[in-house]
Amino acid sequence: MSFAINRLKLLRPYILSHKKQVIIGSLCLIIVSLLALPTPYLMKYIIDEVLANKNLRLLNIIVLLLVGIQVLELVFSFLTSYLFGIFGQEALTSLKKNLFQHLLSLPLSFFDRNQTGYVLSRIGEVEGLNFFFSDIMVRILIGIFEFIFSLVILFHLNWKLTLISLCILPLLFLATRLYSKGIRRVSREVMEKGAVVNRQVQEALSGVDVVKVFSAEERETARIHNFLEDYKRASIKRTVTFSLSSELLSLIGAAGGFLVLWYSGWDIIKGSFTLGSYIAFSGYLAKLYGPTQMLASVGLSFQPAFTALQRVSELMDLEREAKDSGIKLSKFQGEIEFRGVSFSYDSKPALREVSFKISPGEKVLISGPNGSGKSTLVKLILGLYRVSEGEILIDGYRAQDISLSSLRNRISIVSQNTFLFNDTIWNNILYSRPEASEEEVEKVAKLSGVEEFALKLEGGYQTVVGETGKRLSGGERQKIAIARALLKDSDILIFDEATTHLDKESERRIEELVNHDFGQKTCLVISHQRQDIEEFDKVIELEEGQVTIREPQNAYSLSDTFGDDRMKA
């Protein structure tokens, strides 16, 4: 029980933030319930008094009263649906927004373990919480009131028949208890298998180029078909379980009605019970069984909703990055030091006792073959991962003591795998510093070479690049990424295989930027090539997670590093 209450606490702020709508909607629902209470008794008067005594005046009064009640019920029912409908959608939207924000704040390791499609499906499970933001909870409370009121009237009309009717209630709760656990289990299974299907579909669509190159359309379809079949079987199982439980509840309720009909029929024939009393009794019996059946069906409907709440809570409970805690620095000098740093991916060592020091303003080449730990080293500097052993210092401060927002605001990175948003060239550049002026954007566009190709396009800087920038070439995407990094105006710049897609002229432009425009900034250039040259202040060679430091006299040539595969003589 305490576990369930803790989960429900997640919903409290979303309900309280819309309490005005909830209160007014609840009052409207209470009015609807009160208006419905006199109707069965008025029907008794029509049959036993009006029709029996041919009282037209009383007939007119009661019919007008019933019409008035119906109109008022219609108005207040609409208001109830309207207010709770708005409340439900606003609460779900707020919850989705907060969940998305929470997911973005999770450490990178979470996204390493979970594919995008799977995460998107988990966000979609928020829709299952609509149950908690509907009028159902208020209806339960009103149902309890209706149950008590109807029970009093039923005892007044016929106490023996009422006791017979009450014998059905334990069967309703027994049936509910029988199916509740099963529905919760199959609901969780359906949600999980649905998330897996979305993950597989997203993966296939993301890699559609590879699928087509290898003519693997049928293979991918067959693979996803298997996951769809699993999802289908789980969905059918849930549907059948729901249907059986619902029909069983209806059968029990109908059995109670038949029992009342049979017993009251005997009393009517004997003259000890009037037809009007039977009509009224049946009406109030529906209000007795109605709340009971509603509570029973709510118990069943609650299971998938609570399962969704559990799964959403699991995501919200994940520890996020403490982005704003720690020392806040507005500027870095650019000193970076690794002291005995080790790091592992799932027990697989990536770096082993790495130690080196980079002075402010130095131009450093980080070299090594694929898989040697170059990119891992960069992610550790950016705080995307935490070291297993040792410590990283920035300007003498331990990296873990610096707020992540400060750390990442003062470091720019241009990587080989450039990601662009499906937006304009201008907005993709502006992404790193939205408050930048038009002049600043144009300046970095010119420095990076974006201006050369952007102004030739029909839309210029307002050209939409397409999903992940697919409408542009690899080199053009890379230039936008460089412009984005330049606009950020950071104190430390990292070029992670950044010139892979660039032509020779563009490579020379980047070389010029590193040597001259970034003279006071610390620059790390990551490359798997190993040509000997002189422009770097330091070369850090990585091999199987361990480093070798080379001083300037044994260093590499910057021009060769930026793309020239020929060894210098």
Image: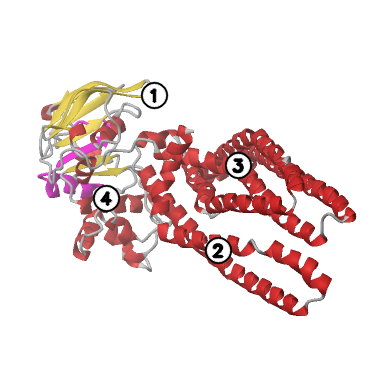
Answer with the quarter of the image where residue 324 lies. top left
Residue highlighted by disc 2: 31
From the viewer's perspective, is residue 256 above or below residue 379?
A: below
Q: Which residues are magenta?
A: 504-532
Q: Residue at x 50, y 59 (%)?
A: 26
Left or right, residue 494 beside residue 56: left
Residue highlighted by disc 3: 299
Amino acid bearing label 4: Ile
Secondary structure at badge 2 equals helix
Label disc, if present, on residue 346 of the rendered structure: 1
Q: Are marks 3 and 2 in contact (CB under 8 Å)?
A: no
> Which of the pair 269/305 is nearer the observer?
269
Q: Earlier in the sequence, mark 4 or mark 1?
A: 1
Q: Nearer the viewer, mark 3 or mark 1?
A: 3
Q: Decide if residue 28 is in sight here.
A: yes
Q: Nearer the viewer, mark 3 or mark 4?
A: 3
From the viewer's perspective, is residue 538 above or below residue 78?
A: above
What is the x, y in percent for residue 298? 61, 45
Secondary structure at badge 4 equals helix
Answer with the quarter of the image where residue 93 lies. bottom left
Q: Decide if residue 528 is in sight here.
A: no
Spatial CA distance of label 1 from label 2 is 60 Å
Q: Are marks 2 and 4 in contact (CB under 8 Å)?
A: no
Residue highlighted by disc 4: 482
Spatial CA distance of label 3 from label 1 is 42 Å
> Which of the pair 487/480 is nearer the observer?
487
Q: Nearer the viewer, mark 4 or mark 1?
A: 1
Spatial CA distance of label 2 from label 4 is 64 Å
Amino acid bearing label 3: Gly
Q: Are marks 4 and 1 in contact (CB under 8 Å)?
A: no
Answer with the quarter of the image where residue 2 lies. top left
Amino acid bearing label 1: Asp
